[in-house]
Each structure stands twice: as C-alpha cells, then as structure tokens.
Image (tube, rainbow, N blue to C red):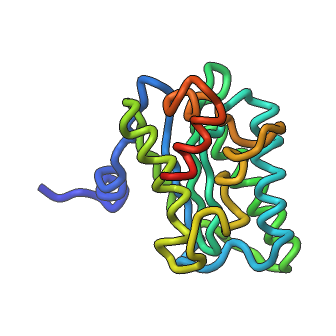
Amino acid sequence: TCYTPIEVRKMARQARKLSKTGLYHVIFRGISRQNIFEEASDYEKMKEIIKKVKFETGMEIHAYCFMSNHVHLFLKEVENARLSKIMTKILSHYATWFNIKYLRTGSLFGSRYKSEPVEDERYFLSLVRYIHQNPVRARVCKTSSEYKWSSYSDYLTTGKTLTDTKLTLDMLSSKKKEAIKYFEGE
C-alpha cells in the first residue's frame, strides 16, 4: 500500500495517552536541543509564566526542573483546563517573550512536548525524586538542594510557593516535619 506524505506523518504521530488522574509528567526541549534559558531572568520568566497559567487555570504543579535546554513539569490538569490548553499557554507565551528578548524568529521548542500519565502513588513519588535529581545526573550540581531552578526548595519551606507540595508530603508522613525529613533523605 502506498501512503501520501500527510498519511505517513499522521501515522508517525501517536495519540497522547490520557491520564485517569489528570496527572502528567511533561517534558519539552529547545529545538535541536538548543538552550531555552540563557540567563537567570529567562528562568524567572518561565516560572512567572507558569505561575500565571496556574492562577488562570487552577492546575496543580507537583514538581518542576528547568534545565538549560529542557524542562520537566509534573502537573495536574483540571476540568476547565486540559493539558493541551495549559501547555499551549506556557509554551507560546515563553517562546514569544524569548524571541523578542533575543531578537530571533522561528521555533524555540523542538517537536511537540512529551507527556506521560501518572496513575499510581509509587510512580508519583519516584517521579518527584527523578525530576529533582535531573541536575545531579547532568552533573550541574552535587545535590538537588544546590540547584536553584527546581521545586526542590519549595518542599522545604512553609511559605506559599509555586509548587503544590501537600499531596507529596502527605504520602511520606502525616506529620509535616517528618515528611520533609523523609523528602530530604530521598
């Protein structure tokens, strides 16, 4: 059987797996693995955009890590804002801002973002750990606590943060101080 180029492209792109829980591990990268963050203000802008989208949609953020050329987000979509709507807002706002700031045109992000459903507690906890260990595995720092551009420090504070830490900490212990101690021990 012969297929048209459009049919081949449609066949190659698989449908996203939908999460029954609304929880997703999302990864997006710079095109050709180029940097999407050049300086501290770029990381801050991404954080600001995610905070704004979180406020607008009601989504939850359970963990994040901004690396120089890619981002890990562990989020929960909500009824009025599905994953595609959330990611469109985040990626389009950031790419527009970045392109204006650096006087560039064209795509900033390579292909479409990846998303993996998170359906059980065991995977939930290992994913939070995996995301926070990303800079350590990349040899950017020696410990997760040293890395500024992740949600790790949000788990150690009692103030209001971008990250929704309660569910994760509750899985570790019903006592917050004990849960934080378990979290730090990874």
Residue placed most toward the observer, 1 or 110: 110
Residue at x 51%, y 62% (from the top left corner): 133
Q: Is residue 171 left or right of residue 86?
A: left
Residue placed most toward the observer, 117 or 14: 117
Residue placed most toward the observer, 112 or 38: 38
Q: Is residue 181 above or below residue 60?
A: below
How many marks on residues? 0
Residue placed most toward the observer, 8 or 129: 129
Name the quarter where the N terminus is drawn: bottom left
| Corner quadrant of residue 75 | top right
| Corner quadrant of residue 110 | bottom right
Q: Is residue 6 left or right of residue 61?
A: left
Residue 60, given in percent of the width and then of the height, sits at 66, 33
| Corner quadrant of residue 180 | top right
Residue at x 56%, y 75% (from the top left corner): 142
The furthest residue to the top: 79
Residue 140, given in percent of the width and then of the height, sits at 59, 79
Residue at x 83%, y 41% (from the top left corner): 52
Residue at x 58%, y 49% (from the top left corner): 73
Residue 68, given in percent of the width and then of the height, sits at 64, 74
Residue 47, given in percent of the width and then of the height, sits at 78, 54
Q: Is residue 132 left or right of residue 165?
A: left
